[in-house]
Image (spheres, grey):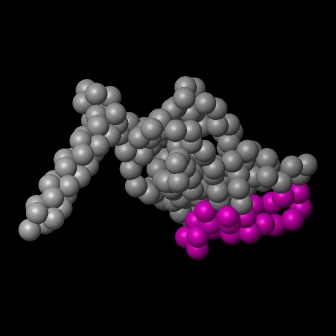
């Protein structure tokens, strides 16, 4: 019977120590309980993402803010994301290519990704032709017509401490609601009816 009482006492002490360790960890993660518990996330265009997302429109000069529980370092990579709905043709020199030919290409170097602070970076780019040209240098790139759908032409993967968030996005140049007509589009006066 004495053994059992001793085992219960050890168990209670263990639970108290465990609770104190959890409380201390939360205190450290919240800066002495002065801020909320940090989770890994990315904020862009004023919206915070803690899970994968798509449908973003990234303007050249957009600022990304990365939060991480331990303020650990992060990496950023950008890949071509070709789908049936966003596939389009373009010329590389005299050869015809499609966006799906480039699916999965790492185009990180085609974007200017520059750290502003330890947890903030800015993304810049020229246009879709400039991005393709950086991957296939030495050729003239011509995109005769914008894709029918420009949803998620790229996926940006931001990773920190074994966790990552994937953000599907398109370029601002393909967002006519922002005042920039898609590249390669023109009006045909043969089809305008008043």
Left/right placement of residue 187 relative to residue 1 reads right
x and y percentages locating residue 93 in the rendered image:
88, 57
Outermost residue on the front side: it is 2
On-image quarter of the C terminus: bottom left
Q: Nearer the viewer, residue 128 or 154?
A: 154
Q: Which residues are magenta?
A: 81-104
Q: Eyeballing the image, is 125 above or below 51?
A: above
**Do we see residue 109 in this rendering?**
yes
Left/right placement of residue 8 relative to residue 104 reads left
Q: Nearer the viewer, residue 194 or 179?
A: 179
Left/right placement of residue 96 relative to residue 168 reads right
Residue located at (40% from left, 55% from top):
51
On-image quarter of the N terminus: bottom left
Specify the quadrant of the image occupied by residue 39. top left
Residue located at (23% from left, 52% from top):
14
Residue located at (75% from left, 52% from top):
132
**Do we see residue 144 in this rendering?**
no
x and y percentages locating residue 96 in the rendered image:
81, 67
Left/right placement of residue 178 relative to residue 7 reads right
The answer to whether residue 68 is magenta is: no
Q: Nearer the viewer, residue 26 or 21?
A: 21
x and y percentages locating residue 118 in the rendered image:
54, 29
């Amino acid at each position: 019977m004495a053994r059992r009482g001793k085992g219960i006492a050890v168990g209670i002490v263990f639970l108290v120590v465990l609770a104190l360790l959890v409380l201390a960890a939360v205190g450290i993660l919240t800066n002495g309980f002065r801020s909320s518990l940090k989770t890994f996330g990315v904020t862009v265009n004023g919206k915070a993402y803690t899970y994968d997302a798509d449908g973003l429109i990234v303007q050249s000069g957009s600022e990304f803010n990365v939060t991480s529980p331990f303020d650990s370092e992060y990496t950023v990579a950008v890949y071509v994301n070709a789908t049936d709905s966003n596939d389009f043709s373009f010329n590389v020199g005299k050869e015809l290519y499609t966006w799906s030919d480039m699916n999965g290409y790492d185009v990180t170097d085609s974007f200017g990704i520059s750290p502003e602070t330890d947890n903030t970076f800015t993304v810049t780019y020229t246009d879709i032709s400039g991005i393709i040209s950086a991957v296939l240098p030495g050729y003239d790139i011509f995109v005769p017509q914008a894709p029918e759908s420009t949803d998620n032409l790229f996926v940006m993967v931001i990773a920190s401490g074994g966790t990552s968030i994937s953000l599907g996005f398109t370029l601002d140049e393909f967002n006519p609601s922002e005042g920039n007509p898609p590249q390669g589009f023109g009006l045909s006066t043969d089809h305008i009816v008043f």
